[in-house]
Image (cartoon, rainbow, N blue to C red):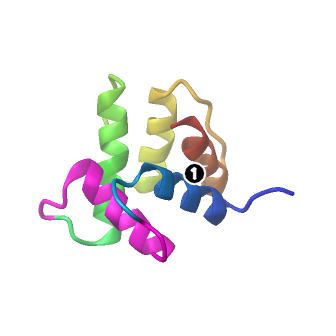
Amino acid sequence: MIKSLDQIAREFYITNITGTATGMSLSQLQKTYWTQEVGSGSASTWTPLQQQWLRKIINDNGGTPNSKFTSDLLKQALASLSVGSSNFTDANWRLLFESL
């Protein structure tokens, strides 16, 4: 049976969050993980935290983020991991979770 993107994301975040993550919604898991990885700083909403995390992946792998758009940052993060990207955002998220 093929897992949905939400299932893959949930498993990724639960596996990588420090501490207990049982009973949290996917959005809570995401925000907890991103805050753990990049700190909250001035970004307390979902999109800026997500973008900061993608920029961190790019920087950590020797790249330079050069877009303000999440979909572009996602492709750049994949490229920094030497993973090819798709024209479909959901497929790119799946590739990212499977590559980290």
- Identify the residue under disc 1: 93
> Seen in the image, is 56 located left or right of residue 85?
left
Using the rendered view, name the quadrant where residue 8 is placed. Answer: bottom right
Q: Position of residue 90 (x, y in %)?
A: 63, 57
Q: Is residue 68 visible?
A: no
Q: In the picture, which quadrant includes the N terminus?
A: bottom right
Tell which of 98 and 82 is nearer to you: 98
**Residue type indicated by callout 1:** Trp
| Badge count | 1
Residue drawn 82% across the image and 56% down it = 2
Picture coordinates of residue 45, whole percent (x, y):
28, 72
Q: Is residue 37 magenta?
A: yes
Give whichever of 94, 32 is nearer the camera: 32
Q: Nearer the viewer, residue 73 or 45?
A: 45
Q: Is residue 60 left or right of residue 87?
A: left
Which residue is most to the left? 42
Q: Secondary structure at mark 1?
A: helix
Residue 85 appears in view = yes
Q: Position of residue 14 (x, y in %)?
A: 49, 58
- In the rendered structure, the answer to whether residue 18 lies left or right of residue 88 reads left
Which residue of the protein is positioned furthest toward the right in this rendering? 1
Q: Residue 87 location in percent, x, y?
A: 66, 47
- For the point 62% across and 42% down, which residue is it? 95
Residue drawn at x 37%, y 46% is: 54
Q: Residue at x 31, y 43 (%)?
A: 55
The boundaries of the magenta stretch are: 21-42
- Mark 1 crowd level (few <14, some 14–19, many ≥20, 10 Å Cα): many
Is residue 80 found left or right of 19 in the rendered image? right
* Residue 15 forms part of the magenta stretch: no
- Quarter of image, res 51: bottom left
